[in-house]
Image (spheres, helix red, strand yellow):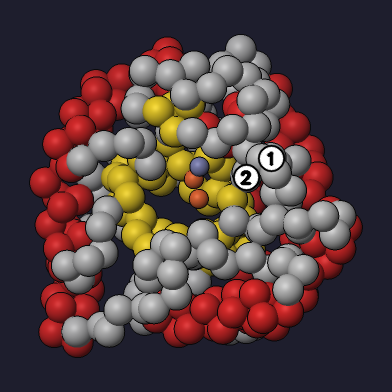
Amino acid sequence: MLKIGCHVSSSNGYTSMIEDTKYIGGNVFQWFTRNPRGCQAKEINPIDFSNFLSLAKEYNFGPFLAHAPYTLNPCSSKEEVREFALDVFKKDMEILEKIPNSMYNFHPGSHVGQGKEIGIQMIIELLNNVIKEEQSTIILLETMAGKGSEVGSRFEELKMIIDGVKYNNHLGVCLDTCHVFDGEYDIVNHLDEVLDEFDRIIGLNRLKAIHLNDTKNPFGSHKDRHECIGKGYLGIDAISRIINHPKLKHLPFYLETPNELDGYKDEITLLKSKYIG
Ligand code: FE
Ligand code: FE
Ligand code: ZN
């Protein structure tokens, strides 16, 4: 069965995210634990939360992928920004530990001129500060498009981060199809080779989720602008090969395309029609 869903709004609480997912024909979802450009986490309503947990079980939905706010930058040159990242990360982990089958995706960060090596060391430091030996939540490093001073657009950089973390058995990777194509991995013409490279450098056992997006920009653009499925430079044929690839088809796919719910519903219908399983 295709595990698919989209990024849903968390503004009406947890139960409504399950309802939205059911409406669009999905069975997994991604959400922001807090305002993506700010920092405030919403109070959790215990009734809503327990309702969510029982519906998730009843519908057999999941995994649930939380996305860290964009303002979280573990490798900023400013100490207060790094402290904020640590604080948000710790608080989000507390929430996610209450959700079975949860994962936490974050952008490794932007080193803002300090250089990739220093950036990578700072990201490792944050992860060593937050990951507990006994935790159940899987933390995912997202593959980035490489715009500005972003860390994580090369598989080698993600591997260096993973290698520096003590309890890295709780670490995985979320591959964003828009980002990797923008970042010069040709998943349209050489999907097998890209996956072999991922396997050789990081190990495919670390790949836990796919952000399924088309891209508004051509190969290697380093721009990071998502397009609706089939309307960008990846195209529906390449995307169909991705969801059906023997090394990927078991993974959860999360759409982050520029859509409202009905648009997501249409994309999921389309993708299900292309899924051989
Ligand atoms: Fe992201
Ligand atoms: Fe993404
Ligand atoms: Zn993106």
- Nearer-the-camera pick, 184 or 156: 184
The image's mark for residue 146 is 1
Kind of residue at disc 2: Thr
The image's mark for residue 59 is none
Q: Where 253 sits versus 234, above or below?
A: below
Distance Cα–Cα, label 1 vs label 2:
9 Å
Asked where in the image residue 46 lies, by quadrant, the reply is bottom left
**Residue sitting at 68 percent across and 76 percent down?**
82
Q: Residues within 10 Å of mark 2 (few under 14, many from 20)?
A: many
Q: CB atoms at circles 1 and 2 under 8 Å apart? A: no
Q: Where 152 sits versus 63, above or below?
A: above
- Judging from the image, what secondary structure is the residue with disc 1 in? loop
Kind of residue at disc 1: Gly
Pointer 2 residue? 143
- Judging from the image, what secondary structure is the residue with disc 2 in? loop
**Residue sitting at 66 percent across and 40 percent down?**
147
